Image: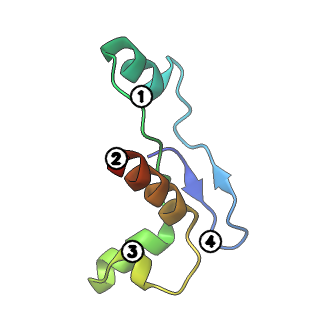
């Protein structure tokens, strides 16, 4: 989890600031492609609680856009 998306203004705030390079540094060390990051997202939580796919909700989700970017990288 890379941060928190405010449900009001949709701004992402870093909660767990990486002090040692984080997962991106680890990927470099292990020679693995860093695919991206996904923030804590209230829309994702709601989808899980309702038992529906994340993208099925009509609310805009910054996290979903980031997730879809990761999926696209995997499918390349």
Vertical side of 63 occupied by 3: above or below:
above
Label 4–label 1 contact, CB within 8 A: no
User: What numbered label is drawn on residue 7?
Assistant: 4
Image quadrant of residue 44?
A: bottom left
Q: Is mark 4 on a helix, strand or loop?
A: loop
User: Distance from label 1 to label 2 (Cα)?
Assistant: 17 Å
What is the CA distance from the residue labelled 4 to the residue labelled 2?
A: 28 Å
Q: Position of residue 10 (x, y in %)?
A: 67, 66
Residues marked 1 and 3 touching at CB (< 8 Å): no
Residue drawn at (73%, 68%), measured in percent from left and top?
A: 9
Task: Name the mark on residue 54.
Answer: 3
- Please report whichever mark, 1 or 3, sits nearer to the chain's N-terminal start: 1
* 63 left or right of 48 in image: right
* Quadrant in the rendering for residue 71: bottom left
Q: What element carries label 2?
A: helix
Q: Which residue is drawn at 38% across and 20% down?
A: 26
| Secondary structure at numbered mark 1 | helix
**Residue at screen point 62% across, 71% down:** 7
All told, the count of numbered labels is 4
Q: Where is residue 65 in the image (x, y as percent from the top left)?
A: 53, 62
Nearer the observer: mark 3 or 4; the answer is 3
Circle 1 is placed at which residue position? 23
């Amino acid at each position: 989890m890379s941060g928190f998306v405010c449900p009001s203004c949709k701004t992402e705030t870093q909660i767990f600031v990486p002090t040692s390079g984080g997962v991106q540094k680890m990927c470099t060390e292990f020679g693995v492609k860093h695919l991206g990051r996904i923030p804590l997202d209230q829309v994702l939580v709601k989808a899980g609680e309702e038992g529906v796919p994340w993208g099925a909700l009509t609310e805009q989700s910054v996290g979903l856009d980031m997730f879809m970017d990761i999926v696209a990288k995997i499918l390349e």
